[in-house]
Image (tube, rainbow, N blue to C red):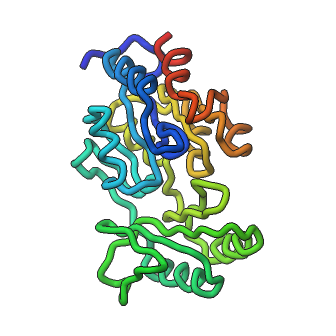
Amino acid sequence: MGENQYKYKLLALDMDGTLLNDNHEITLDTMNWINKAIQEGIHICLSTGRAAMHALPYGQQLGLDTPMVTVNGGEVWKSPHELWRRYLLDRELVRKMHQIAVDTDSWFWAYTTEELYNRDRWPDTLDTQEWLKFGYNTENDEIRQQILLKLQDLGGLEISNSSLTNLEINPAGISKASGIAEVCGLLGITMEQVVAVGDSLNDLAVIQAAGLGVAMGNAQDIVKKAADLVVASNNDDGIAEVIRDYILV
């Protein structure tokens, strides 16, 4: 693929609340603009808190054969089925995070390299799995704050969220920003040439690090404040707006 003539070379897309509308679909308008961008030589990179297995169907729907960042940077994929790097959580920290969930009676889940576990289904031993990400979900602000403080005390963790009621945890220093930086290395471009779009705290670092950081209209306030611009919501084709008005110009 020849070098495109546009200022920005890569579009890093969060999925839930960004690329996908609230029905977890990519709308026709957004799909059309993504296809236009691909035809113009723009790299499209899914950058998600989801595991690869939950991101791949959307990548296939878009016809992407490009790098992907999954589980908030815990995995970087050179192409949809070719793993480049993986960053695992310390098992001892997973054990402690699980204990915090039990102590606070909170809903929790965790991704290993193979599958998704949660409160209803937890393995007898943590030692045979490779852990990528741990998460909590609670509507109770006070309990969520307690969990956050306990996690901060543990140290060695990167703490973010993908909604106002959850917490998502990766190894310290691992985020969508670190993942997209690796993708830039693979593609021979710089972070200045990246447009990053998202709606939650797990998008904050990459929105701040990218050449153009974009918050969706439905984004959390802290993300909107950090972004260079705010576009329409995920239900109103904000991604189409980004491509049309800021990339293919």
Residue in view at x 46 percent, y 44 percent: 24
Rendered position, 222 above or below 29:
below
Provide residue 91's location: percent of width, then percent of height.
42, 79
Would you identify the image quadrant in which residue 156 lies?
A: bottom right
* Above or below 124: residue 218: above
Count the numbered circles shown: 0
Tell me which residue sits at (38%, 20%) in the image.
37
Q: Decide if residue 28 is on the left or right side of residue 240.
A: left
Counting from the top left corner in percent of width and height, residue 143 is at: 72, 75
Residue at screen point 22% across, 48% down? 81
**Foreground pick, 46 / 176:** 46
**Residue 90 vertical placement versus 71 (above, below):** below
Measuring from the top left, give residue 112's x and y in whole percent: 36, 69
Residue 168 visible, this angle = yes
From this viewpoint, is residue 177 visible?
Answer: no
The quarter of the rendered structure image containing the N terminus is top left
On the image, the x and y values in percent for residue 174 come to 49, 56
Residue occupying image coordinates x 59% and y 32% = 213
**Up/down of 102 relative to 195, above or below:** below
Residue situated furthest right in the rendering: 142
When asked about the image quadrant of residue 122, the answer is: bottom left
Q: Name, please, the residue furthest toward the front.
A: 23
In-front residue for pair 106/246: 106
